[in-house]
């Protein structure tokens, strides 16, 4: 059995977790914090990144410059309705977000949220492992592989799972350090 063909599935879990972790606010400005916020505009729903350019002019400031100036108020409303705790400042041309300092209580809440998202990633890895293991067992029952190959594949699969769980832990640790700064 070629287990490397399944690595793309594990890579998707890692990429998703990276995105989830980057959406958790730290004291620093990052565009990924707001780029996927859903905005109602012209009767449709769009992400901010589809309506505007997002830049970081200063370490604690996000600047959102809509291509259509009529969308400024919709963007402000969407940011206020998101649960990020940010106060958008509009000048009619764009939206400025100044990142407030995180309180110790808020940091702990974000770390708890990060741990929940990490557990979801671990569960996704386990689910993929379960599917692959089922495929290995089916292959053995169908006579495509021998019993010895089945157990070798199981060991190889566990090494891959351990590798990806390690990547998840590494991402979580790095984000937790950012949150505690």
Image (cartoon, rainbow, N blue to C red):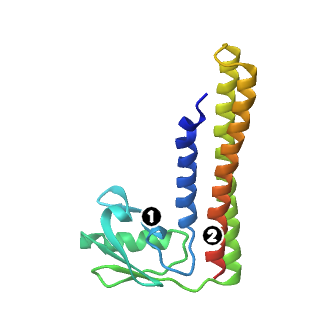
Q: Is residue 154 visible?
A: yes
Q: 10 Å neighbourhood of mark 2: few (<14), some, or many (≥20)? A: few
The secondary structure type at the circle numbered 2 is: helix
Quadrant of residue 49 within the rendered picture: bottom left
- Mark 2 sits on what residue? 174
* Direction from residue 11 to residue 139 in the image, left or right: right
- Mark 1 sits on what residue? 37
Q: Sequence order check: which comes first, mark 1 or mark 2?
A: 1
The secondary structure type at the circle numbered 1 is: loop
Q: Residue furthest top?
A: 143
Q: Position of residue 126 (x, y in %)?
A: 69, 42
Q: Looking at the picture, tell me which residue is in the foreground, 136 or 34.
A: 136
Q: CA distance from mark 1 to mark 2?
A: 24 Å
Which residue: 31% across, 70% down?
Answer: 53
* Direction from residue 88 to residue 163 in the image, left or right: right
Q: Quadrant of the C terminus?
A: bottom right
Q: 10 Å neighbourhood of mark 1: few (<14), some, or many (≥20)? A: some
Q: Quadrant of the N terminus?
A: top right
Which residue: 54% across, 85% down?
Answer: 100
């Amino acid at each position: 059995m070629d287990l490397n063909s399944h690595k793309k599935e594990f890579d998707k879990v890692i990429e998703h977790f990276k995105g989830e972790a980057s959406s958790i606010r730290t004291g620093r400005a990052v565009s990924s914090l707001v780029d996927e916020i859903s905005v109602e505009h012209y009767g449709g729903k769009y992400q901010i990144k589809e309506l505007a350019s997002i830049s970081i002019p200063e370490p604690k400031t996000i600047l959102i410059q809509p291509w259509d100036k009529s969308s400024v108020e919709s963007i402000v409303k969407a940011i206020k309705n998101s649960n990020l705790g940010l106060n958008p400042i509009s000048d009619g041309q764009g939206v400025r977000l100044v990142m407030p300092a995180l309180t110790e209580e808020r940091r702990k809440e974000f770390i708890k949220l990060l741990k929940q998202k990490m557990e979801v990633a671990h569960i996704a890895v386990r689910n993929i492992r379960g599917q692959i293991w089922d495929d290995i067992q089916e292959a053995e029952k169908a006579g495509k592989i021998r019993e010895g190959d089945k157990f070798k594949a199981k060991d190889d699969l566990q090494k891959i799972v351990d590798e990806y769980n390690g990547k998840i832990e590494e991402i979580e640790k790095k984000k937790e350090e950012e949150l505690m700064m």
